[in-house]
Amino acid sequence: MCAQLAEAESPAPGATFLRKAAPDAGVECYWRLADGAAWAWQAKFSESMGDAQWQQIDKSVQTAIEKHSRLVMYFVCFPLDFADPRIEHREFAADRWERHVARWEVWAQARGMRVRFVHWGEHELATRLMRDENRGRILYWFGKQLFSREWFEDRLEEAVANADQRYLPELNVDLSMQDIFDGLGRTSEFFDRLKVMQGKVRRAHEKLSQEDLEGPRA
């Protein structure tokens, strides 16, 4: 799935995408730019990030740097966002990421390379999957249907076509019930009515005297 999302991230015109099989030299897939530079991806699936998982990533990064001399971007994908409470004298996932990135940069510099390391976590992966063009991937990987804008437009066109001549604007009868749909749709008309009601309530409240608020005295 990460390789498919990576393929949609074309870095520049003239770039070529390559998907690798195991053994992969620390790279699941990569884009080779016209000048020979490479953007590479590595994916790890884990429900937590402990020492063993970080060691696996270290190994992949080290191998990628050794085997891909033109590497300039390296994306590390795992479906977790980083905890970052910034509590003094305690290390959390965000701190570990920064520490490991600093180590990887030293490894790259030792080979005369300058590599940028990027994390694709739960947020980055979900953001890409929710794009309309990726709705097929959601169905393929998770068996779920993404209700895109195009999907709703298609259903609306079907409803209009099925209604045909049975419902005409000239025969429309306004009912108070239809205002409910403005609220469900969070339309501008709905919020405009709320503002009008708010103004009426505020003006009515300002007209009340202290005696009106406290009620008649015995």
Image (cartoon, rainbow, N blue to C red):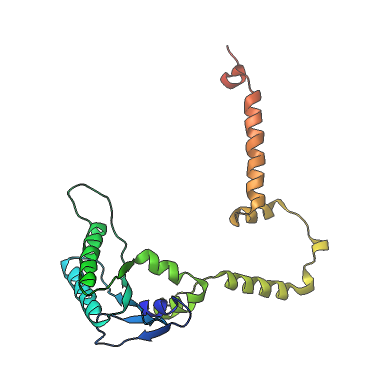
Q: Residue at x 30, y 75 (%)?
A: 43
- Is residue 78 visible in the rendered image? The answer is no
Could you tell me residue 168's position as x and y percent? Answer: 80, 66
Q: Quadrant of residue 50?
A: bottom left
* Residue at horizontal 20 percent and vertical 66 percent from the top: 103
Relative image position of residue 109 (x, y in whole percent): 23, 70
Between 195 and 181, the one lying in front of the other is 195
Q: How many marks?
A: 0
In the rendered image, which quarter contains the N terminus? bottom left
Q: Residue at x 59, y 72 (%)?
A: 150
Q: 164 or 190: nearer the eye?
A: 190
Q: Picture coordinates of residue 10 (x, y %)? A: 45, 77
- Which corner quadrant holds the C terminus? top right
Image-quadrant location for residue 77:
bottom left
In the displayed structure, does residue 112 sit left or right of residue 118? left
Residue 22 in view here:
yes
Work out which residue is located at the far front of the displayed protein and give it.
112
Q: Residue most toward the right?
A: 170
Q: Is residue 100 left or right of residue 217?
A: left
Residue 121 falls in image quadrant: bottom left
Q: Position of residue 54 (x, y in %)?
A: 20, 68
In the rendered image of this protein, does residue 183 appear above or below residue 127? Answer: above
* Residue beneath the point at 32% across and 68% down: 116
